[in-house]
Amino acid sequence: MGKRKYLFLYPFSLLYRLVTDIRNFLYDKGFLTSAEFSIPIICAGNITVGGTGKTPHTEYLVRLLREKFRVAVLSRGYRRKSTGFRVVTPSSTVIESGDEPLMIARKFSDILVAVDRDRVNGIKAILKEFPLTEAVIMDDGFQHRSLKPGFSILLTDFNRLMTRDQLMPYGYLRESNKNIKRADMILVTKSPEDISAGTIDEITRELKIYGGKEVFFTSLKYDAPIPLFKDNFPGQFSLSHEDRGNRGVVLVTGIASSGPIKKYLGKYFSELLHIDFPDHHCYTGPDIEKITRAVNHLKSSEKYIVTTEKDAVRIREFTNIALPLKTTFFYIPISVKFLNNAGPRFENLIIEYVRKNNRNSGVPQN
C-alpha cells in the first residue's frame, strides 16, 4: 500500500477533510462531548487505513499489565455477525467475536476480552458486569471521539508514515495529520532492526512537528512456526537456511499488509507461492481448494502451508480439510520488539499511568 495515484480522487479528499475537520472541531470545542471514565483506558490506534500492527502491540500491553492489574481488552470485533456487547471466550467463534478478539482470548484466557462497536457502551458494560476491572486496553478507536481514553498510543507504519500520506480516498489517512496532537505517544511500527540513528532522528523530528509527543520505534519479530492442526502433525518443523533448497511454501494471508511476512519467509524457502486475500477474509471451501492446488503445484520435496496467526483463527474452524493437507498447515505468531533498548522506558510510562489512575489504591508502585 502507498499513496494512491488516481489524481481524480484528490478533490474528494478535500471534501473528506472538510467533513472530518468539522467533526473534530466540534469535539475539540465541546459542542460534541466525549465520555470519560475513572478507570485507566489505553487506546492503541491509528489514523490510517490498513495494518499498522495494532493487535501485536495490544498483546504487548496485555503481557505488560496482566501480572499487576486485572485487565480487559475491548475491540470492535470487525466483521462479526453478532451485535452489541459480547464477552469473548476461548470457545467463542469467529462469527460471534471477530478474528482478532478471539485470537487474543485464546492466547490470554486469564483476562477479559469483549467486543462492542459502541466503545462507550462497551466500557459501561465492562464496569457493570466486571467491576473489579482495573484497566482497559482498547484495540483501535483513535477516531472514536465519543470516548476519551486516558492514554492514546498512535501507531504509524515505518514504510508508509502518516506524515507522508494523503487523506482518503486519494491516500489512506482517516483524518488530518494535525490530529496527531491528540496522542500521548507515537509508535513507528515495522521498523527495520538495523535502522540508523540518523533515520530515527529525522522521523522523530518530522512527527514532533504535529505535537511534542514521545516517539518510539518497534519492529516485528516472527516466532517459530506452530502446527495449525496440532493433533494431526506427526513431527517438528523449524526454519533454517540449510534446508532452504529443499523446501517450498504456500503463504496464505488475509491481512492488510503481507509484504513483511512474505519477505521473511523468502529467506527460508527456495519456492514461495503467495495467495493473498483481503484483510479479515472469511475463508470458504473454494479457498481451501485453491490452497490445495497451490500446494500440489510446488515442485520442492518438502511442502508447507504457512499463514498468519489471525488467519489461523478462521481456517481452524474448517473441519473437513483433508488430513494430508492438515499436516502441512502452520501459522507464525508475531511479537513486538522495541528498538534502541527503549522497551523499559515505554513500559514504565504505561505502568505508571495505570497505577496513578487506578481506583484501587492498594495497587503497589512499580
Image (spheres, rainbow, N blue to C red):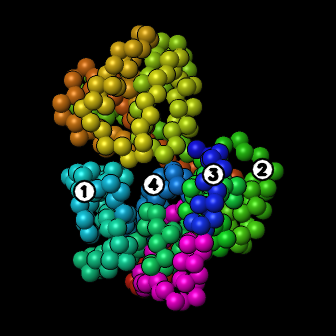
What's the CA distance linking mark 4 and mark 1? 20 Å
Q: Earlier in the sequence, mark 3 or mark 2?
A: 3
Q: Nearer the viewer, mark 4 or mark 1?
A: 1
Amino acid type assigned to the residue bearing label 4 in the image: Thr
- Is residue 334 shown to the viewer in this render? yes
Which mark, by number, is residue 185? none
Q: Which residues are magenta?
A: 18-47
Q: Secondary structure at mark 1?
A: loop
Marks 2, 1: nearer the viewer:
1
Residue 287 percent across, percent down from the top left: 31, 31
Tell us which disc is closer to us: 4 or 3.
3
Residue 356 in sight in this render: no
Q: CA distance from mark 4 to mark 2?
A: 25 Å
Residue 199 is labelled as 2
For residue 329, what is the image quadrant? top left
Residue behind mark 1: 81
> Which residue is disc 4 drawn over?
55
| Label 3: which secondary element | helix
Q: Work out whether 268 lies above or below 298.
A: below
Circles 4 and 2, Cβ within 8 Å, touching? The answer is no
Foreground disc of the pair 3, 2: 3
On screen, 148 above or below 158?
Answer: below
- Of 165 and 198, which appears nearest the observer? 165
Query: Quadrant location of residue 115?
Result: bottom left
Image mark for residue 8: 3
Where the N terminus falls, by quadrant? top right
In space, the residues marked 3 and 1 are separated at their CA atoms by 35 Å
Element type where label 2 sits in the image: helix
Indicate the amino acid at tag 1.
Lys
Evaluate if marks 2 and 1 touch, with contact meaning CB atoms under 8 Å apart. Answer: no
Task: Please name the amino acid that badge 2 sits on.
Answer: Thr
